[in-house]
Amino acid sequence: MKWFNNITTLAKLIISLGVVWLSLAVVIVTADKSLTAMAESEKALSEFSFNKILNLQEFNSHINYNRGQLLEMTLTVNREEQKTIEKSIRERGLKIDEIVAALDELDQDPRFQVRFTVLKNTLAEYRLTRGQQINLIYQGKMEAARQLSLEVQDERYDKIRAETILLVESEKDNLKKAIALDMQKAKWSIQFFWIVGVVASLFGFVMIALLNQTIAKPLSVVSAAALQVSTGDLLVSVPVEERADEIGAVARAVRQVIEKLRPSIKLITEGVVMLGSSASEILAATTQVASGTAENASAISETTATVAQVQQAAQLSSQKAKAVADSAQRLAQVSAAGQKATDETAAGMRLIRDQMEAIARTIVRLSEHSQSIGGIIASVTDIADQSNLLAVNAAIEAARAGEQGKGFAVVAQEIKSLAEQSKQATTQVRNILTDVQKATSAAVMATEQGSKAVEAGVKQSAQAGESIRVLAESSSEAAQTAIQIVASSQQQQLGMDQIKTSMGMINQAGVETAASMQQATTAARNLHELGLKLKGLVEQFKV
């Protein structure tokens, strides 16, 4: 991972959060496409297949009604009643034409059109013969009209009914396939959500460990070393960080500060020792003015040069410490920006969770509407049962009437047939509703699982935010430590200035010593005391 250490901290955070953001974007786009596809599929099932089946059922119902009306027309001799029945037949015929046109426009599939063409041709033949029957009825040839119905029309009616049932069954098969395909898509989407979630989670854990290893731990080591330096301990060692990012720059800066302070403090210590020795000699041998003055001047010159070198080192140390503080503050700002981005990611995940819950509520309402339709179907079934019972009673009464009740028996038989067909139609519609309810239940489960996946994404975003927060706190602590280093360096700079000023005073005292022995003695005593103070000052540093 050497390349990872050599990129900037901002780049590390962008890589870490970029993968999480990319995973979130993929989940959002996939969820949107999946939900849109499911919604469009449900809309197609509702507007296409269900309407197609209902139109075919209504078509069959109108055909049954016209057949019953035609039989009733053969049983009456009243011309006005016959015309009324014919008018009703023609009105139902117009409704049949509307249904045929609607089905023809609704489904342009070639397989459907081939079978629907057979149905339309049979319907045309059925209508042509029905016109002939009506003409025979108006001519009073009732028996011929009935005979035509029994010989030709029954066969065509059965063919129309069979073709209608085949079309309904075919559409039901298509409906089942569409529902199965939607469930498979929902299953794929859920699996994809889980895979992306697991991968994002693993990547998040890896990046948390990697950031902790490459940023938090090195910062802790550098901060501890800087804290020891601020207390005067120069024996601390900073590990060598061969990396090109801000952490490596901070570590190198602190190590350079320590390395430059060590020889400077040693030089100061040596100068102080020499200064104390010289002061002792001056104080002990004030009578040897000439030689003592020369030695004192030499010592003062060496000490002044040493102080100048130490002052330059202190200035360089202060500059390095300031650079460390600036780098630590920039790192704290970058960490704060990363935490803000993580909070925005968590907010986006919560918004997706709310949308998933809204979709689930909509599907539940659809299921409730389907149950209401089931109640209506139950009512239609009851009506069909009652019609069947009435038809049985009518057949019994017709049997009692003997020869005169034969026509009424035929009508009763047709009513019974119509009741059975109505009951079968309601059973088919109930089966369709059952399939729709199963599909809505599957959609509810899919949305619930999608909500769970999004909830997991929210928790993962919260964990990433917590990690960024810990990193921001570590960066803030490093910045504070760097500021302390700057303050300590400034204090050292002030100390060096004070030392330089003192050495100027010593030099002036040495010059005055040549003019006055009393002044030399006093200056030597002052110099000795100052040497003791400097010795106590440098002893605070551990080199």
Image (cartoon, helix red, strand yellow):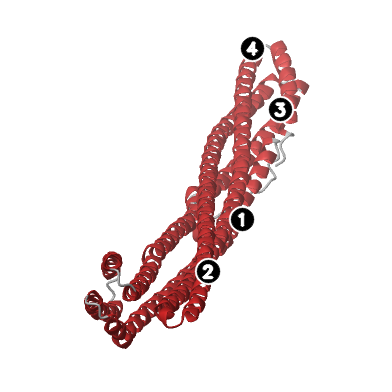
**At label 3, which amino acid type do we have?**
Leu
Q: Nearer the viewer, mark 3 or mark 2?
A: 2
Q: Which residue is mark 1?
A: 213
What is the C-alpha distance between the residues marked 4 and 3?
27 Å
Closer-to-camera residue (386/202): 386
On the image, numbered disc 3 is attached to which residue? 534
For the residue labelled by badge 1, is the local secondary structure a helix, a strand or a loop? helix
Query: Where does the image place residue 369, in percent across and percent down from the top left?
Result: 51, 57
Q: Is residue 208 left or right of residue 40?
A: right
Is residue 79 shown above or below 160?
A: above
Q: Callout 3: helix, strand or loop?
A: helix
> Which one is in front in this view, the residue at disc 1 or the one at disc 4?
1
Residue at label 2?
386
Q: Which residue is mark 4?
A: 515
* Residue 48, quarter of the rendered image: bottom left
**Of callouts 1 and 3, which one flags the residue occurring earlier in the amino acid sequence?**
1
Q: Residue at x 41, y 64 (%)?
A: 41
Dot placed on the residue nearer the N-terminal end, 2 or 4: 2
Q: Amino acid at mark 1?
A: Gln
